[in-house]
Amino acid sequence: MSLGTIVLAAVIPKCPICVAAALAAVGVGTSVGLSVAPIVRPIGVAVAIATLVFVVWSEWQRRSRRSCVAACAKAGANDAAND
């Protein structure tokens, strides 16, 4: 991890009240949050679904590669035994 990532993780607010306080400190009220929420919510759902699909796909790829390696090793052992 880079130092910037660590500092950013330490500085960003982590609770909803802290987020509200940080937004209020820069002059952003709830009206902006209410107008942005309908846009941000579907994006968050899309990112979550894309992440789930990626994790399932990569696990499926890993398992299929592992079974292919095992089948190839078994075939190689059978070929060696037949020689």
Image: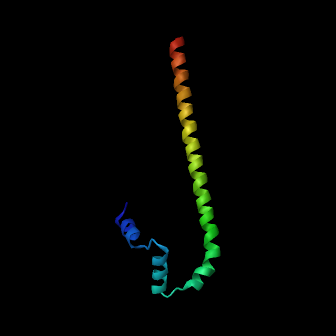
Vertical placement of 23 versus 74: above or below? below
Residue in the foreground of this view, choosing between 29 and 39: 29
Residue 78, percent across and down?
54, 17
Residue at screen point 51% across, 25% down: 73
Vertical placement of 70 versus 25: above or below? above
Residue at screen point 49% across, 82% down: 23
Residue 76, percent across and down?
52, 21
Q: How many marks?
A: 0
Which picture quadrant has residue 47? bottom right
**Colour mapping used in the image:** rainbow
Residue in the foreground of this view, choosing between 23 and 53: 23
Residue in the foreground of this view, choosing between 3 and 40: 40
Which picture quadrant has residue 48? bottom right
Residue at screen point 60% across, 72% down: 40
Which picture quadrant has residue 38? bottom right
Vertical placement of 60 versus 68: above or below? below
* Residue at the outermost left position: 3
Residue 39, percent across and down?
64, 74
Residue 1, percent across and down?
37, 60
* Residue at the outermost top position: 83
State left or right for residue 63 relative to residue 18. Answer: right
Residue at screen point 54% across, 12% down: 82
